Amino acid sequence: MQKYVDRYGAERVWAAMVVTVFGGLALLAALFPHRVYVEFLWEYFWAPVVADANGWSCVAWAGGSVEPCSTAGPGAGPTATPGYTYVSYGGYIPTLLLLLTGFIFAIRRLDVDRYRAGFWGLFPFMLFGGALRTVEDANVAVRAETGEAALSLPWQALLISPFIYVVVAVIALVSLVVAIWLERRDYVPGYEYALAGIGTTLLALSLVVLARWASVGGYGFFPLLAITVLVVASAITAVVWLAIQRFAPELNRGTEYMGIAILWAHTIDGTANVIGLDWATAFGLPGNLNPKHPVNAAIQNIMARYLPESIATVTGDVWPFLLVKVAAAVFIIWVFNEEVFEESPRFTIMLMLTVVAVGLGPGTRDVLRATFGV
């Protein structure tokens, strides 16, 4: 691989990989439509999006007509439910790495420096991504209530995972270009301020749309749930961070205060899952949320099977997911040591932003969809 990079350049090698991977998939789908497209691409990647967009708990291929499982009948072919699977994870992670690499090349061409400042400038976009995803949930709720919605497929898919990650990343890149332009013409003292301002504005606009649509299709407003998640997650983050500072300060010498953002992002996700899946009804919601990811679904199923009911009624059965999220965040902080930052600061910051996004994005969505009743 290195000889090709030396001969043709890293960007050309990356472009060739993108064309080979996606062009190869398209060719295989054309040659073997049922085996490759229906039983792989549709079942694991597109069908969950279709189910989510229509508010269906299950979708069936049904000879290509695509129907809810409840009406498709037996022998309808592959089926899928909203959310991720281990197979889709196996496809999304390499794709995410390819996308991440492409953005690194773009940032290199922009000649961006002060990467740590850029991290904080991009932080509001992580919240914006979660809020924008919840706007799509509200869109589904409006359709269920009125029979009409502002967005429908295929445009609706742009606000559903995993496509929304690409959408938010492109918006963030465009915002970064604008912010750097403003800095280099002395309109702002630093590009990170303009970048954070753009991200915060987008977050506010998405919350306005969410509130408006939720007032039509939602089943109530539950701010106490959001307050509880924020307070509990922030308290856990503070305790764990102070413990690191006191007993293992070498862990955060690389990430420094960015480690707090990583820890808080994943603690928000873990806390939102625990409260949403086990205790949503205690805040007035008509029912608890359903797990959207295979990891928290597996933990919930295992705990429901082996945890005595007398204990589960007191503690719930999703709390180990919060422990897993906190442990994973601490591990990530440890991995991003000083040597990693010295060897490749640009790539390291991009990886950290990705880590924050995959925690704070779903966590923000879980909090907001429960808070606005969508």
Image (cartoon, rainbow, N blue to C red):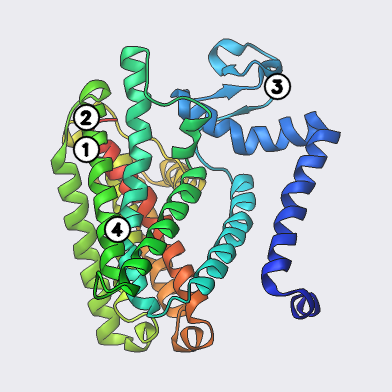
> Where does the C terminus fall, quadrant-wise?
top left
What amino acid is at disc 1?
A: Val
What amino acid is at disc 4?
A: Pro
How far is disc 2 from disc 1 in space, using C-alphas? Answer: 6 Å
Few, some or many C-alpha atoms within 10 Å of disc 1 (few <14, some 14-19, many ≥20)? few
Point out the tag, 3 or 2, that comes first from the N-terminus.
3
The local secondary structure at tag 4 comes to helix
What amino acid is at disc 2?
A: Arg
Circle 3/circle 4 CB separation < 8 Å:
no
**In x, y percent, where is residue 234?**
21, 62
The local secondary structure at tag 3 comes to loop
- Identify the residue at horizontal 33%, vertical 24% (top origin): 141
Circle 3/circle 1 CB separation < 8 Å:
no
Which one is closest to the eye, mark 3 or mark 1? 1
> Where does the N terminus fall, quadrant-wise?
bottom right
**Which residue is denoted by mark 3 in the rendering?**
77
**Which residue is denoted by mark 4 in the rendering?**
124
How far is disc 3 from disc 4 in space, using C-alphas? Answer: 42 Å
**In x, y percent, where is residue 130?**
35, 47
**Which residue is denoted by mark 2 in the rendering?**
212
Residue 316 seen by the camera: no
Circle 2/circle 1 CB separation < 8 Å:
yes
Query: Is the residue 197 above or below the residue 184 in the image?
Result: above
**Which residue is denoted by mark 1 in the rendering?**
208
Circle 3/circle 2 CB separation < 8 Å:
no
